[in-house]
Amino acid sequence: MKFTQDQLKEISLLIKRISGFVIEEKKYHQMGLKVLKRMKIVNAKTPVDYIHLLKLVNHSDEDSEISLLTASILNHHTSFFRDLDQFICMEHYCLPEIKMHYSILDYTNIRIWSAACSTGEEPYSISVILNSSLKPPWTFHLKASDIDQPSLNFAKKGLYDARIAKSIPAKYLNEYFEKIHGGYKVKPALKKNISFDILNLVENNSIEQMKHFDIIFCNNVLFYFDELTQNEIIIKLCSALRPGGFIFFNGQASIASKSKLCMQKFGSALVYQKDYSSCSIKFPPVQWDPSFLNDFPQKTSSDFINKTDRSISVYIFS
Ligand SMILES: C[S@@+](CC[C@H](N)C(=O)[O-])C[C@H]1O[C@@H](n2cnc3c(N)ncnc32)[C@H](O)[C@@H]1O
């Protein structure tokens, strides 16, 4: 079955409208193959019938055809401790600063959000670090979200194949994962502070309700969007952060937002921090103690020490 260029463009625009995902013309062929697969499943006879079906139902409904087609096209690739330097930076740089400021406020609950968490490897990696480094009275809540319900269902089950043992340090694997036939199961301790919820980053209502996070991870998703959409999402993520909160982005997304974000480089990780100007409380400046780098196990991040740039660059966009 042949699609016209206009039909492929129309389908790609419908996908962009629901997910923000931009499909370049050179990828129309690949998209066409996924469309054909879905057409067979829903028994659509012609591209015109299928496009009609795509437009038929409310696109926020996760069982609608446009949602199912979009889910089949999105890239869900992820892994445990994917960008290791981010986790090191969170543990040794972000958490001490957050704790110091929260001690002044007599507040002990840290809020983290893994936006676009796919099948759960990123939030479970964050939870490993938080469970091992936060001792009472410190507690945390981890919100994990994605646009794709099947990925979230997978994440909630917490069942992974045996290959994950290659990416998770043995001490964490033994403590937080139970060996089962053919793989590993996430132990309840790792799950108990995580809530998995569907959330579309390009849908204003859902993202605008997210507030007061201390750290946000928004990895490997922004570069699927056009620059305007990226900027809109970055601004909203900044609003979801409390003053002084941190955001990790990776991939090639340029942080060209209209927000004020202060950037620091830790090994390969870039961490952006929201400034305190919108905050009425005056916190004492935090002196970053780089001594942890001395006992840093080289094997976990070979060039972390050499590449760490402790100078602060301030990005101000207006
Ligand atoms: C490549 S995975 C990244 C997973 C994880 N953050 C990581 O870095 O390993 C991208 C995820 O973004 C999700 N995604 C794509 N568009 C989205 C949107 N508009 N809102 C929320 N999630 C979205 C996809 O469903 C997919 O699970």
Image (cartoon, rainbow, N blue to C red):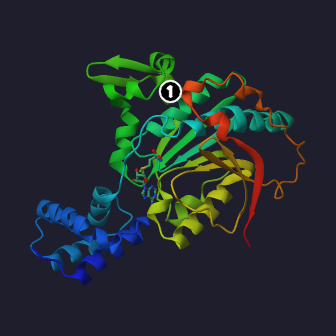
| Residue 237 percent coordinates (x, y) | 62, 57
**Kind of residue sitting beneath label 1:** Leu
| Residue 93 percent coordinates (x, y) | 72, 36
Where does the N terminus fall, quadrant-wise? Answer: bottom left
Left or right: 192, with 308 as reference point: left
Dot 1 alpha-carbon crowd within 10 angstroms: few under 14, some 14 to 19, many 20 or more = many
Left or right: 45, with 302 as reference point: left
Nearest to the observer: residue 61 or residue 286? 286
Number of numbered labels in the structure image: 1
Instruction: Determine whether the beta carbon of the residue marked 1 sits less than 8 angstroms from the nearest atom of ligand 1.
Output: no
Left or right: 258, with 206 as reference point: right
Secondary element type, mark 1: helix
Q: Residue at x 59, y 37 (%)?
A: 85
Compared with 128, 216 (above or below) is below
| Residue 135 percent coordinates (x, y) | 68, 21
Q: Is residue 193 visible?
A: no
Compared with 184, 196 (above or below) is below
Q: Quadrant of residue 215?
A: top right
| Residue 225 percent coordinates (x, y) | 47, 66
Q: Which residue is disc 1 drawn over?
A: 190
Q: Residue at x 54, y 66 (%)?
A: 230
Compared with 72, 181 (above or below) is above
Q: Is residue 66 visible?
A: yes
Q: Quadrant of residue 128?
A: top right
Residue, far front: 306
Where does the C terminus fall, quadrant-wise? Answer: bottom right
